[in-house]
Image (cartoon, rainbow, N blue to C red):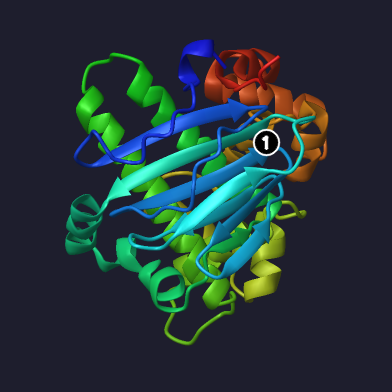
């Protein structure tokens, strides 16, 4: 991505903005920051490098796509194990007053307090789909903060809330593995099933067989809930996944296959129709490149 989205690392550990701050760092030699704590939430999304992070009494050897959440008042620090590979990461700071305001709007924003604050689970190794999803949302937030557009202030907060909600959803789903629950609406069951099996061969026919419901009823349900057909919904979700993948170093063809597309030509046409540009052009416009 454009060079101006990168931030030169400094040792400042206090927030300037009242609500949140987001930085994209890439370093070969990390200036040592001593063990410290602060009065805000720090969310680290690890992209690349050879890094060990210590949070509280726990030590974590990070892998690309890992998420580390440090709540207020917890001592922590990181160090680079080798400078051969740049240490690349997104660092999101969220003030406690802003966090509490979000929780006041909806308790879903505060689910992370259970695993992170109360159970002291700070480190999360994400599956490929979840990692791509969170990375793409963080990137949207970063872009909204660096480009002066109409409604910028609102857009930034919407993007930040989207990141925070997605992380809470991930934590909730890790604690509550998916299963069809009595009382869960059919629409919720269908959407969750597609989410969990997005990289598999899903169709209206297979959904009808899995849920023992007529194809007509499922089609009607999708039209009434999301305003599109089952096929359109699946394609849109797969394209969302591909976007997250190609912003990283994943090969475009591989990203297409991992998202469940069986034919590259069909994928390419769907991508251009949705985004108005080719996958390669999308990558060149949006991707964050490692520092040279």
Tell me if residue 252 comes above or below residue 244 in the rendering.
Answer: above
> How many numbered marks are there?
1
- Residue 129: x and y in percent read 65, 50
Residue 177 appears at what percent x and percent y? 59, 76
At x 62%, y 74%, the residue is: 211
From the viewer's side, name the closer residue of 110 and 4: 4
Instruction: Classify the position of the C terminus by image quarter.
Output: top right
Q: Residue at x 49, y 47 (%)?
A: 34
**Image quadrant in which you'd find residue 97:** bottom left
Q: Is residue 193 above or below residue 251?
A: below
Residue 126 lies left or right of residue 159; in this view the side is right
Categorize mark 1 by other alpha carbons within 10 Å: few (<14), some (14-19), many (20+): many
Horizontally, residue 184 falls left or right of residue 93, namely right
Observer-nearest residue: 256 or 5?
5
Residue 216 in view here: no
Question: x, y percentage for residue 50?
Answer: 74, 42
Query: Circle 1 — which element?
Result: helix
In the picture shown, does residue 202 fall above or below 44?
below
Q: For residue 131, say whether it is visible.
A: yes
Farthest residue in the bottom direction?
182
| Quadrant where the image shows the N terminus | top right
- Observer-nearest of 223 and 90: 90
Q: For the point 21% across and 32% down, which residue is it?
A: 154
Residue 90: x %, y % from top left: 51, 37
* Quadrant hosting residue 240: top right
The residue located at (60%, 14%) in the rendering is 277
The residue at which mark 1 appears reads as: 245
Seen in the picture, residue 285 relative to 259 is either above or below; the reply is above
């Amino acid at each position: 991505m454009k060079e101006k989205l990168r931030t030169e690392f400094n040792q400042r550990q206090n927030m300037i903005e009242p609500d949140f701050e987001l930085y994209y760092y890439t370093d070969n030699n990390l200036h040592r920051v001593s063990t410290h704590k602060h009065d805000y939430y720090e969310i680290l999304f690890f992209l690349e490098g050879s890094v060990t992070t210590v949070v509280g009494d726990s030590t974590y050897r990070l892998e690309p796509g890992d998420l580390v959440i440090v709540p207020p008042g917890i001592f922590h620090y990181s160090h680079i194990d080798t400078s051969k590979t740049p240490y690349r990461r997104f660092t999101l700071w969220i003030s406690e007053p802003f966090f509490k305001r979000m929780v006041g709007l909806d308790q879903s924003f505060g689910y992370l307090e259970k695993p992170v604050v109360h159970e002291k689970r700070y480190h999360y190794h994400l599956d490929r789909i979840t990692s791509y999803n969170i990375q793409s949302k963080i990137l949207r937030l970063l872009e909204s903060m660096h480009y002066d557009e109409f409604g910028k202030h609102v857009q930034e907060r919407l993007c930040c809330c989207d990141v925070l909600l997605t992380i809470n959803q991930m934590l909730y789903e890790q604690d509550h593995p998916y299963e069809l629950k009595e009382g869960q609406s059919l629409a919720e069951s269908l959407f969750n099933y597609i989410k969990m099996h997005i990289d598999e061969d899903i169709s209206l026919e297979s959904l009808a067989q899995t849920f023992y419901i007529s194809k007509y009823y499922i089609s009607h349900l999708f039209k009434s809930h999301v305003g599109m057909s089952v096929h359109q919904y699946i394609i849109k979700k797969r394209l969302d996944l591909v976007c997250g993948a190609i912003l990283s170093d994943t090969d475009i063809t591989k990203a297409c296959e991992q998202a469940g597309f069986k034919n590259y030509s069909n994928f390419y046409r769907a991508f251009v129709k949705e985004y108005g540009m080719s996958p390669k052009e999308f990558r060149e416009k949006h991707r964050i490149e490692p520092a040279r």
